[in-house]
Image (cartoon, rainbow, N blue to C red):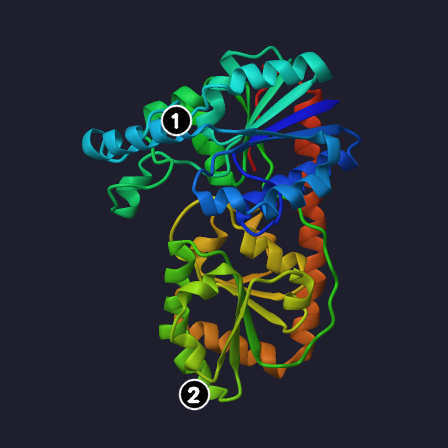
Amino acid sequence: MKILIVAKRPTHPTNSGSRRFILSQVELFKKMGHDVHYLYIHEEWHPKKWGNKESINRSKEYWGDNLHIRHVTILTILWYYVLIGLRVLFRKGNQKADDTFPWFLSHQVNHLHAKYNFDCCVINYYDLSKLFTQIKIPLLALTTHDYYSYKALLTGKRYVKSSTDASEEAKAMQRCPNIFALNTEEAVYFSKLSPFSNIYNVFSTYEYKSSKVVGNKVILFLSGDNIYNRNGLRWFIDSVMPIILKRHPDASLRIGGSICKFLKGYEEKKWVDLVGYVEDSSDFYNSADVVINPTYEGTGLKIKTFESIAYDKVTMAHPHSVVGIFRPETAPIFNSIEPKEWVDYLDTIWQHTETIQQIKRQNELYITSMMNFVIKEYQRFFNSNKNSKHSFL
């Protein structure tokens, strides 16, 4: 099949969960034998961001002629800001399904379709769903990434990007005959919002990368800079790390990713190593045996949890960060809300190499099983009748 993927973000550099998911989906489609094109809607208008061409250049290097870029006009961006102000004032911070739908998008996609004759179009996020009412590509699907009903209410903030209400999210979902959910709970939720759509639970895909036991007492955390990750890390530093250091004075916490920009003052602590931007995730993950995901709030992707397992690490998480994952009963993940239980588990890991080896065997089985499941879901999408019903895990 010839597939067009549409999104408001570039694929490179792959430094966020959403980009990571989109690129993994693209690469899987390619491995399945499909010809994939990418339409990137560039919405940045700030002069500094317009001048920074790294993302576009790196995306072009990857995609070649299959990358199509459309710059949103400043007038369109200003209109978005007007709508944001109105929703904060009158809609309790919730946007309508089509508030940030680019005016030109349907024309652009129809033009590309006339040239390339696509068999399938996959859009990213509900705010692009209006496209499906205005194009004639035969097979259509929405990658949800997350659910957005009442995000502003959940966070207690007046403005949260993409926050909407259930009726508007249902309106978007019901335009989409096929919906890609990224965890089990969201798959169930979307089936309620859009009961006549086919729901596919595609999680995400990861290549298992075997690693050796390192044998140090370094704890790894690799993360973007969103508020949920920052809060989770602060919980770990304030509640768990003091107990760890009391039992293991030589332990340390190595933090990578853009979250480091928000950790001023922590670099003064001898047991903290702020790496910053990580170019090669393999080098980072191969520097220790234990990876944490202490995020305890928010919704959407569980990238850090799955990625740790795929890199063959001992994975420790807050229970929130295992909600909706693939077959949780078989997942090789320690999870607890009790700081002492975290430290007791680390005692076992750091004192018994054979326990780490056992976890590594479980990691491989889990990632392989999840990959096989996701491939079958996509095969079902490409081959099935649109009116077929889906049975969830």
* Distance from Cα at disc 2 to Cα at disc 1: 57 Å
Describe residue 235's horizontal placement relative to residue 185 as left or right. Answer: left
Q: Amino acid at mark 2?
A: Lys
For disc 2, the marked residue is 246
Quadrant containing the C terminus is top right
Does residue 176 appear in this view? Answer: no
Which residue is the extreme one toward the left?
Answer: 89
Residue type (three-letter) at the residue carrying disc 1: Leu
Residue holding disc 1: 75
What residue is drawn where x is 54% and y is 18%?
A: 177
Count of labels shown?
2
Left or right: residue 336 versus residue 21 is left
Q: Nearer the viewer, mark 2 or mark 1?
A: 1
Element at label 1: helix
- Tell me where residue 61 appears, x and y as whole percent: 72, 43
Tell me if residue 151 can be seen: yes
Quadrant where the image shows the N terminus: top right
* Percent position of residue 32, x then y: 77, 33
| Residue at image point 50% right, 42% down | 50
Residue 315 in the image: above or below residue 171: below
Q: Residues within 10 Å of mark 1 (few under 14, many from 20)?
A: few
Q: Which of the 4 quarters of the picture holds residue 118? A: top right
From the viewer's perspective, is residue 334 above or below residue 79? below
Viewer-proximal residue among 243 and 218: 218
Q: Secondary structure at mark 2?
A: helix
Q: Earlier in the sequence, mark 2 or mark 1?
A: 1
Q: Where residue 252 appears, x then y in whole percent? A: 52, 80
Determine which quarter of the picture holds residue 376.
top right
Q: Residue 141, percent across and down?
A: 58, 24
